[in-house]
Image (cartoon, grey):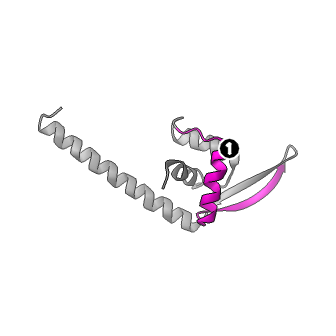
Amino acid sequence: MTEPAFLVLTALADQPRHGYGIVQEVERLSGGRTLLKIGSLYGVLDRLTGDELVALDREEVWQGRLRRYYRLTESGARALEKEAARLAENAEHARGRLRARYAEGTA
């Protein structure tokens, strides 16, 4: 799973959001390291929708423009949980190797 896909799923984990809301939440979640452009976002959303990890929640007109809200599906929640566990396991392996390196005095 790509980092943008992981962050989009994470952004949708607590509530449905519209496109710009997802962009803002991804920026906040990543501490400003991931700045999705709207075109990139909709490419990610198309893939996630095609994989049935997110779904269209609703549409509403706001200031004369159509806003589409997306939500995390149950499959999406399971995929996010699996990816979060995989990343945590990889991070723990890296931390363990670094601890061993410093314990051996190799710095």
- Compared to 78, does 89 lie above or below? above
Taking the spot 17% from the left edge, 43% from the top edge, the residue there is 100
User: What is the quadrant of residue 60 in the picture?
Assistant: bottom right
- Residue 33 is situated, as x and y percent measured from the top left of the image, at 51, 36
| Closer to the camera in the image, 43 or 83 | 43
98 lies left or right of 87: left
In the structure shown, which secondary structural element does the residue marked by tag 1 occupy? helix
Q: Verify whether residue 70 appears in magenta.
A: no
Badge 1 density bin: few <14, some 14–19, many ≥20, Cα 10 Å: few
- Residue 64 is situated, as x and y percent measured from the top left of the image, at 88, 45
- Asked whether the viewer can see residue 15, the reply is no
Q: Residue furthest top?
A: 107
Taking the spot 46% from the left edge, 60% from the top edge, the residue there is 81
Taking the spot 71% from the left edge, 61% from the top edge, the residue there is 57
Q: Which residues are magenta?
A: 34-61
- Compared to 31, does 97 lie above or below? below
- Residue 91 is situated, as x and y percent measured from the top left of the image, at 33, 48
User: What is the quadrant of residue 26 in the picture?
Assistant: top right
95 lies left or right of 9: left
Q: Which residue is mark 1?
A: 38
